[in-house]
Amino acid sequence: MNTYYIETYGCQMNVYDSEIIAAILQSEGLEEVDTPEKADLVLLNTCSVRDLAEQKIHTRLGQLRVIQESTNPDMKMGVVGCMAQNLKKDILRKKPYVNFILGPDSYRHLPAILKSGNIPKRVIDTRLSSLELYDGLFPARHEGINAWISISRGCDKFCTYCIVPYTRGRERSRKPESILEEAKRAVQKGFVEITLLGQNVNSYRSSTGGFPNLLRQLATIEGLLRIRYTSPHPQDVSDDLIAVHKDLNPRVCNHIHLPLQSGSNAVLNAMNRTYTREHYLKLVEKIRTAVPDMAITTDMIVGFPGETEKDYEDTLDIMKQVRFDAAFMFKYSPRPGTKAAKMDDDVPDDEKSDRLNRLIRLQYEHTLEKNRFLIGKEVEILVEKESKKRSSDMMGRTSTNKIVVFPALHYKPKDLITRTITDAQGVTLMSREL
Ligand code: 5AD
Ligand code: SF4
């Protein structure tokens, strides 16, 4: 067993986990390759958040089976991550070619599995731990601008639609020293930005203080140009967190991804989101009063059980009031085992699609409006790389997490530059020479 290939699905937490897995595999002497055809070991790091994410994995496993049969007969396969639990039965019954299944808290078992020489025919470990934080393991990251750093794992919020508390278990926070150490190492390796990750990143707790305090400590690291985090829960956005954005602006970036999910109090209540639309609107006002140029983005679900046209209109209405910079929008997808899955999924699929399309159209107008507002204004850009469309252009990001394309001139990746926005088309901002 000399080479591995990992494919990652789902959220940034999974991207981070894949880097932890890569570190474990590399310490066992394996080298990364860029296609499954070349790999002795192929891992799929899976997501369960919506049905579509799970379907993708089933399709991909079928394709990998074909590669194994046609070009790479010695290839071993592992399914890891959030779908492990759910896939257990299916894989045992129908996919004998999968050699092992590991849940998100079981990656430390990899060396033992690999050491057995011939990977055993079957290993399944989907137990969840209330302790595992992968402390002491430094993720094997590809070079780049941003390093993901997980500061907590699991979730105790139990939103009724959400599978995460079941796939990732109870919430636990890493020690600040360990997070600081990891951030310093990332900077030493050349990363200039970090994004802190947690299912509810701002419920982070430690004996020496909460999330705002952690941000303040991280902001003292020399050479660290930008700090981001995702995703906070609206219930836990404290005045102190807002003060951190104000005090450490723009080092702690002017962007908050604040999942709202619905604009209807009845639906929010049925989702167990623990806040009302009024509370959310007040929070937005507080944030914008403290930091006027803060970008606010969100996640929305349409077609939750019981969502009436009136509830949906409340969603459209709150979107118009807040005017998010961007939004991820989804059709509700029942996840077996959650509370909502026991409710009557009574919004027909074509109605869900219609509500989603209307929401997407509305958000597109808001995104354009927000971006056009920046035309003629100066923004600070962290240069990332050559633009995909034209090699004479480069792309970078504003502190508000918007992509800007500009002439390459003398710029290098990781430069922090200031330029004037000259145009806004769709989601991308342009900064041509004036
Ligand atoms: N159906 C649809 N969307 C969901 N999300 C989470 N669970 C579901 C579900 N069952 C969305 C939420 C969350 C984002 C990561 O995915 O909007 O914030
Ligand atoms: Fe998908 Fe949620 Fe797991 Fe991330 S934590 S991979 S979004 S199910």
Image (cartoon, rainbow, N blue to C red):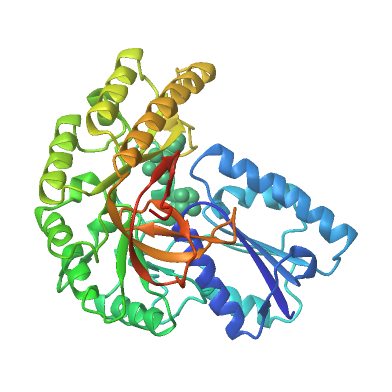
Decide if residue 167 is in sight here: no
Viewer can see residue 367: yes
**Location of residue 197 by image quarter:** bottom left
Name the residue nearer the viewer: 233 or 226: 226
Residue 73 is situated, as x and y percent measured from the top left of the image, at 86, 66
- Which residue extends farthest front? 434
Instruction: Tell me which residue sits at (55%, 72%) in the image.
Output: 21
The image quadrant of residue 154 is bottom left
For ligand 1, which image quadrant applies?
Answer: top left
Quick check: 344 above or below 112?
above
Observer-nearest residue: 302 or 370? 370
**Horizontal placement of 313 versus 27: left or right?**
left
The answer to which image quadrant residue 258 occupies is: top left
Reply above or below: 365 against 52.
above
Q: Position of residue 340 (x, y in %)?
A: 40, 31
Q: Nearer the viewer, residue 393 or 348?
A: 393
Residue at the location (49% across, 64% down)? 408
Q: Is residue 92 above or below residue 143?
A: above
Work out which residue is located at the far right of the displayed protein and give it: 70
Identify the residue at horizontal 27%, vertical 21% (top origin).
314
